[in-house]
Amino acid sequence: MIPKSRTSAPRLAVFVGTGLQARIAAAIVPDLTTVCDVEVVSLDPLYQFGIDLTWTDDVHTIGRRHGDAWYERSRLQKARLLPGFCARMTRLAQRVTHALFYVDTGILERTAIRILGGLGVRTVVLQDAMKRRPKQGPEGGLTWFGAGGADLYLVCGERYRALCPPDRTRVVGSPILPSRLTADTGGDQITFVNQCFARYGEVDLETEVAFVREVVSAARKYGPVEVRLHPHNDPAAYAGLAGSPGAQSVRVVQHDPLPETLAAARVVMGVNSTVLLEALAVGIPVFSLAWHPSPFELPVGPVVHRCDSLGAMERSLASMPDPPDSVAVAQELEAHVAASGQEAVTRITRAIDGFVKT
């Protein structure tokens, strides 16, 4: 039942918790304000990623910045925070008619979707760049993208449509992911792109670092290796990689410009980073390291080399495939990112316009 204090005019709450989500919001909110009132809801005090919201004046902040970030809290600490979070969602439901999220695989987002939906607020999830299919766990479990119960799912490309309810899913692309890139390529290094799996609670830090060390130890037999850390990785945990003995050099970077990384690479490998798509877009062979112990895998097509084991990765490096066919690359990129830039913004705006008017 919609609360009586709710105004009849559509008002959209846009939830933002990470830097990537803030970039997407900054790209789409100006156009969204032409179809409805928009209020940005910041979860930054809980996630503590230090997101930039200087591009908007209408921000409602949830939580207080004290103690550890959400991902670093124990289950008991999280349980103690949830009642207050639920109360804030109940109050938010008094003044908004619709809500937009970028994920529905986090406990905060999924809890908010359930509470707001129960109070008559219609919810939409705009796919947060790369999404991963669970390798384990129940289909309706917390890690399953598309099972959060939102009224509408807007996804980047056809590769993700199968992850969501077909009758509530539209392909809109991404306003920030380029569908085509240009860069000078032809380097000799093997680039491994890491993610912050431990920070997000998918594996423990010891397991994550052990996986990286295993990959690097094997890969350096076939050429110099660059380990590109995620901005939220703790570089101290990987400091020993560059100094360990081996056949080839190992370089650990974190904030180097991506074009420089791609220009030096002859192969790029990782688990689920958007850098894999960006490498593919400039014709670099891409390896998906599907044996990673996190509960996810990247939904890829045949143009990406899927490695189900360390041995499979080594065999692929030993044979070193040629750059992928340009036609196959274009099809794979479109399957992941159907549209980009203003075209994607227009698709998103049209979808949400129809959504708030029904």
Image: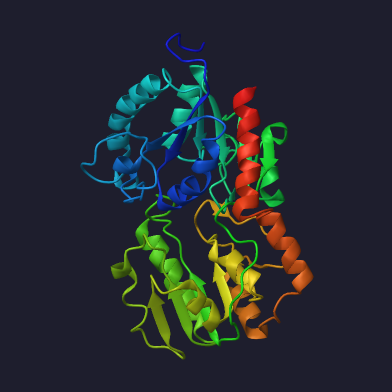
Tell me residue 214's x, y (percent).
46, 73
Residue 146 appears in the figure: yes
User: Relative to the observer, which residue lies in front, 82 or 318?
Assistant: 82
Residue 27 position, x and y percent, is 51, 49
Please state, as top left, top right, bottom left or bottom right, where the C terminus lies in the image: top right
Q: Is residue 329 left or right of residue 149?
A: right
Residue at image coords 40%, 61%: 207
Of all residues, the one furthest to the left in this rendering is 66
Residue 309 locus on image (x, y percent): 59, 68
Q: Is residue 102 something that shows in the picture?
A: no
Q: Position of residue 341 (x, y in %)?
A: 60, 55
235 over 358 or under it: above or below = below
Asked whether, in this view, residue 176 is left or right of residue 180, the answer is: left
Tell me if 64 is positioned left or right of 319 in this view: left
Q: Quadrant of residue 151?
A: top right
Can you tell which quarter of the image residue 122 is in? top right
In the image, farthest residue toward the bottom: 247
In the rendered view, would you say 23 is above or below 303? above
